Each structure stands twice: as C-alpha cells, then as structure tokens.
Image: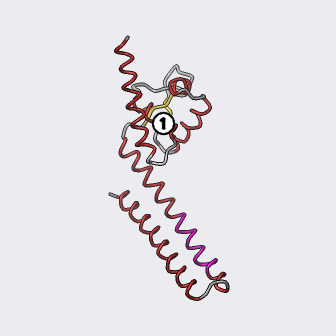
C-alpha cells in the first residue's frame, strides 16, 4: 500500500511541475493540469474520471477539455462498447505545443498589427488638429515602430513554422 501512495505522489508532483511549463503556452491552470493528467495517463479517460481525479466538476472538465480539443492537444476517442466520451492527450508534445503556440502568435501579431494600422490610418490623421506637429510626428514614428515590431513577430513565427 505504501508503494502505491508513493507512486501517486510522484505522478501528482510530475503533473504539477509539467503543468507549470504548459501554462507558459497560454493555457489556464486547469487546462494545463488536465492536459498533464491525460498525458501521464496510460489509458483514455472519461470526463467523470478526470473530474474525480482533479477534484473538479464534470462541467468544468467538459469546458476545459473542449478548449484543449480546439487547440488539438487532446482528442476524443471511440471505443467499441463504451457509451461515454473518452479522451487522450496528443503524445507528440513538442510538435503539438509549438504548432499551437506558433499559430496563436501569428494570429495575435496579425490582428494587433491590423488594429494598429487602422489607428495609424484613421485616428492619427483625425487627431492632427489636436496635436502639435512635433507630437504628431513623434506619435506616428512610435506607432510605425510598433507596427514593424508586430510584423517582425509574425514573420518570425511564420519562419519557425515552415522549418
């Protein structure tokens, strides 16, 4: 019995430490722990099993497992004779996380760059009556640097994705 307890402790410690790394990819604490738990599991698991193991409600687990599925970090698995949905973690850790992370950064950089360009094209020109020429020039230069920064981020992650 002591050995089982020690093994459970080791698994919990691995799960907690691994989930801290996963959180760096923008996942919530529960999403990270849920992924880590599934990854460490040798079997596919039901929502009920995950909820019981993590001490969370089935509704909470369901919401978070959907988020992980949308990121392609977990998949729903079908087994003959089993009526409940089963889930498993994607086993290709590096590829899975980097693909998700790169896609997220490209989308964010592109969206932010577009918003900043809209500000540059519309709002700065509209506020020219309220700003001095020096203020407008300085603000335009800074904004262009920020837009360039976002373009560089987008390019960096696109290049990483193609490697």
Question: What is the tally of numbered marks visible in this picture?
Answer: 1
* Residue 48 located left or right of residue 91: right
Residue 33 drawn in magenta: no
Between 103 and 61, the one lying in front of the other is 61
Quarter of the image with the N terminus is top left
Q: Which residue is mark 1?
A: 75
Quarter of the image with the C terminus is bottom left
Q: Quadrant of residue 62?
A: top right
Q: Quadrant of residue 43?
A: top left
Q: Residue at x 43, y 38 (%)?
A: 19
Q: Residue at x 60, y 28 (%)?
A: 58
Q: Tell me residue 57's x, y (percent).
A: 60, 28
Q: Residue at x 40, y 61 (%)?
A: 158
User: Helix, strand or loop at disc 1?
Assistant: strand
Name above or below for residue 147 compared with residue 25.
below
Q: Tell me residue 108's x, y (percent).
A: 51, 59
Given the current orientation, which residue lies at the most extreme top position?
1
Between 70 and 128, the one lying in front of the other is 128
Q: Label 1 neighbourhood size at 10 Å, few (<14), some (14-19), many (20+)? A: some
Main SS class of the magenta portion in the image: helix
Q: Quadrant of residue 152?
A: bottom left
Q: Residue at x 62, y 31 (%)?
A: 59
Name above or below for residue 161 compared with residue 15.
below
Residue 115 drawn in magenta: yes
Range covered by the magenta-colored residues: 111-124
């Amino acid at each position: 019995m002591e050995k089982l307890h020690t093994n459970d402790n080791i698994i919990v410690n691995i799960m907690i430490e691994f989930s801290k790394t996963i959180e760096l990819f923008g996942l919530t604490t529960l999403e990270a722990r849920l992924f880590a738990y599934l990854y460490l599991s040798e079997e596919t698991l039901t929502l009920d099993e995950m909820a019981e193991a993590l001490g969370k409600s089935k509704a909470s687990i369901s919401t978070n497992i959907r988020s992980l599925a949308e990121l392609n970090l977990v998949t729903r698995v079908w087994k003959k004779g089993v009526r409940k949905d089963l889930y498993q973690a994607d086993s290709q850790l590096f590829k899975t996380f980097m693909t998700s992370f790169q896609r997220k950064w490209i989308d964010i950089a592109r969206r932010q760059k577009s918003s900043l360009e809209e500000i540059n094209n519309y709002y700065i020109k509209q506020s020219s009556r309220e700003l001095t020429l020096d203020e407008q020039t300085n603000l335009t230069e800074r904004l262009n640097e920020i837009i360039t920064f976002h373009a560089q981020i987008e390019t960096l992650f696109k290049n990483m994705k193609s490697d």
